[in-house]
Structure formats: structure tokens, C-alpha cells
Image (spheres, rainbow, N blue to C red):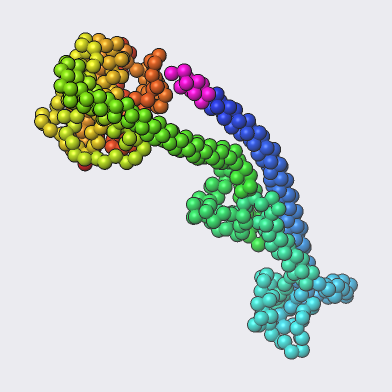
Amino acid sequence: MELYARKRRWKWLLLLAAFMIFGGTFIYTSHLVEKVRTEEQKNLRLWVDAVNRKAQMVSYTESFFRQIKEEERRRVELLAGAYRRLATSEDMADLTFFLDMIEKNKTIPVVLTDSHRNIQGAANVDFDLKKVKRLEGEILEQFSKYPPIPFEYLKGRTHYLYYTDSRLFSELQEVLNDLDRSFIDEVVVNSASVPVLITDSLRSRILAQGNIDSVLLRQYPSVEALTDFLKSENEPIRITLSQYGTCYVFYRDSYLLTQLRYFPFVQLGIIGLFLMVAYFLFSTARRSEQNQVWVGMARETAHQLGTPMSSLMAWMELLKMEEVQHPAIPEIEKDIRRLETITERFSKIGSKPQLENNDVLKIINDSLEYLKTRTSRKVQYLVDNKTGKNSLPIPCNVYLLEWVIENLIKNAVDAMGGIGTFTVVIQEDPKHIILDFTDTGKGIPRSKHKTIFQPGYTSKKRGWGLGLSLARRIVNDYHKGRIFVKNSQPGVGTTIRVILKKD
């Protein structure tokens, strides 16, 4: 009893120490993870700020280009006005001014045509006016980017001024497009390893993506579902690009940060799994050692009993030869047979017993009859056979099963203090024989229902605490059955159930 009390205390102390180690490890790891997370969040904020600044710069550049574009349109309109005034003005001073205005246009490609697109004049073009007489084909497509400006050149005759972007503006536009592309690339391939997604204004089309896990894409197959998920984590950044107009940048925490967030729990799970495996291995090793001790003790006991039992048998034969008559001689013969049975029991411990069909009712009745004369007369023994059968054959080993029943009877008699009722209730189902052994003793606390079957546990001042442990070993290991405390109430009694297979 004291052994298991100390063992229980040590278990609680070790469990407390394990929790303290777990707690300390978890807190320290969480602290480290939080520090890394803070740094990650700082990098993420820097990345978001950089994206915002770059987007503002791109937006400003686009605004600047729009102003240049509008300025070129105004210049073309001024040119058209100059051509118009040139055709209608009679003042030489005006003519000189307008001619000078037209001559100073060194950048904007312009083509002057009549109503039939016959070229009347051109400036800053990259084709030969001597060979090209009419605005058509690729040249017409090039100068159709903007609608032509009509004006009346001579009375009743309408001319048109076609124009396109200047070479400088085209180069600047290409620079702007490169800026847009580089902006997208820098956002998608970011040093912070942030999963990022760029969509159009309606969130219906993905313009670019980076560091997006394929699992996430499978989980959210539609663009709207994916952007809703990303929006739930961080507010998207709104940007304006010349190629796409208004766009949105969706992003979430980096995968490293996500992994770090769950790292303490993973670590705790791994440590817990390791301890469970270690506990299982140590328990297995301990049970193996216990089995070896059981086998060694049992065989040594059988060996030690053999010598005095042989002597007793010899003395009994001598008394028979001398025809000695005494009432104690039949009882001594019973006890000698009993010693033979005990020796047989111990010899079978550690080896696989031979199971044969035997009547469990006969085994129970024989055990009760033997112990009735060897226990207090104030104990009443009852058998309640609910099966209604006269025989219940099951595969078992008679010697070992008798040992189980006798141990249960002796423990019950001790629990009742030699006064009370011991009842055996026999039931069956299609696959099992169910035996309930009930006493009217002092009962067993619920916390001890499993402990009583462990080796060395006993509530008696004298005793090894091996009876119920042997009973469990015989029922569970040798007969593949079950033995357990069905119910017990302090001061009322205890019922121990044994379940045995029919085949």
C-alpha cells in the first residue's frame, strides 16, 4: 500500500516537473517567436510603405505624362490654327508669324491632307514625301491614334491636320510602361517574401502574383474568394497604373511568420509524442522485467514445493502400508493433492498453458466446496446460475482458472472480516461467459479500482499483493478475457466481473 502511495506521489511530482519544463520551454519559445514575428511585421510594414511610395511615384509620373500629352495636343491645335490663319490671312506680318510657328515645330509629327487624304504637307515624319502622296495603310494607322483637326484652308475646301505622339513622348511612354512593369515585378518578387496578388479594379482578373502557395489557390479557386481571404488579413493597397488603370495589391503575412506562429505548438506536440513513446517503451521494458521475475519466482516456488511434497506423499504411503486409521489422514491426502495442484499452477506460469474444454460450473462449485471447510462458517456462499444450464464448457486451463476463483474468494472473505455473503452470478451472451463475484465487505475506493490488480498492492498488514495481479495475468494474458471491478461501494460490498470467451 505504501509502495503505491509513494509511486503515486512520484508520478505527480514528475508530472508537475514535466509541466514546468513544458511551460518554460513554451514560454521561452513563444517569446523568441514573438520577437521574430515583430521583426517580420516591421519588415512587412516597411514593404507596404515602400509599395505605397513607389505607387505614388508611378501615379505622379503618369500624371506628369498626361500633362505632357495634353500639352502636345494643345500644340497641335495651335498648329492647326496657324495653318488656318495662314490660308485666310492677308496681313504679311501675320503670315510671317504663323509660318514661323509652323517652322518651329521640331517634335510633333504632323501631316496636312485634303478631304481625300492627299498629302499637302508634313513635318517631323519618318517617311519620304516624294514617294508617299496619300495618307493610307500603315501610315494612316500610325496617324489615327488621335482624331484629325479639320480647318477650312480655302473657301469651301476643308483640310485635315493629322498628328501622333512625338518621338520624345513615345520614348517617355515606353519608360512609363517599363516603370509599371518594374513596379509589378518588384511588388511580386519582394525581399520580405510576402504572398502578394495584384488585381484589376473589379477584382475579376489577376494581373500578377508572387509567393502564393498552390494549396491556397486550390482552397480559393475564384479570384473573388481569394481576394476576400487576403482582404480579411490586411487591407489592400490601391494603386493606379497607366496600362491597367486602378489596381489593388492584396497581401498577407509571410509563410515564415505563419510557421513561426504555430511553431511552439508543433514543438510541444513533438515533445509530448516523444514522451509518450518513451513512456510506452519504458513501460514495456518494465512489464518484461516483471514477467521475468514472475516466471523465475513461480518456477522456483514449484521447485521448492516439490521436495517436501514428495516426502509427504512417501509418509502417506508408509501410513497406508501400516494400515494406520485416523480421521485426519483423508484430509491430509486432500491437502497433498492440493499441493500438487499448486505446484502445477506455478509450473505453468511463464509458459503458454494448454486450454481444453472444461465445465466452468464444475470448476466454480469445486473451488467453493474446497474453501467452505477452510474459511469461516459465518460466510455464506451462493451461486446464481442465470443461464439455466447444467454445463458450460469453455476452453480454459482448470488449474489456473481455479487459482483465479480461489484468489477472489479469499480476498472477499478477508474484506468481509470472516462474516458476510459471497455470491457468484453466472451469465452468458453469444460469445462470452460472464462471472460476477460479489461480497458484502468494506468496498474499494473508486481511485483504487485499477490499482488493486497491480503487483505488490495490498491493503493487508501481511501479504505480498500478488493474488489479484496473478488473477489478471491468468484471465487477460492466458485466457484472453477480462477482469475488472464492476462496482464497489464503501461499507456495502464489491463486485468483480470476469469475462471469458466461449471459443
| Residue 264 belongs to magenta span | no
- Residues rendered magenta in the picture: 1-12
In the rendered image of this protein, does residue 207 appear above or below residue 434?
below
The residue at 72%/72% (across/down) is: 164
Q: Residue 474 placed where, x, y %?
A: 31, 33
Q: Nearer the viewer, residue 30 or 89?
A: 30
- Residue 464 rendering spot, x and y as whole percentages: 40, 22
- Place of residue 263 in the rendered image (x, y in percent of width and height, measured from the top left): 60, 41
* Whether residue 55 is visible: no
The residue drawn where x is 68% and y is 76% is 142
Q: Residue at x 34, y 31 (%)?
A: 302
Q: Would you say 62 lies left or right of 283 here? A: right
* Among the 4 quarters of the image, the one containing residue 309: top left
Determine whether, in the image, residue 161 is placed left or right of residue 304.
right
User: Quadrant of residue 307 in the image?
Assistant: top left
Whether 46 is drawn above or below 206: the answer is above
Q: As rendered, which of 465 and 429 lies closer to the eye?
A: 465
Regarding residue 278, the answer to whether it shows in the image is: yes
Quadrant of the frame with the C terminus: top left
Which of 43 and 86 lies nearest the eye of the viewer? 43
> Horizontally, is 139 left or right of 493 in the view?
right
Dominant secondary-structure state across the stretch colored magenta: helix
| Residue 50, percent from left and from top | 73, 49
**Quarter that holds the N terminus:** top left
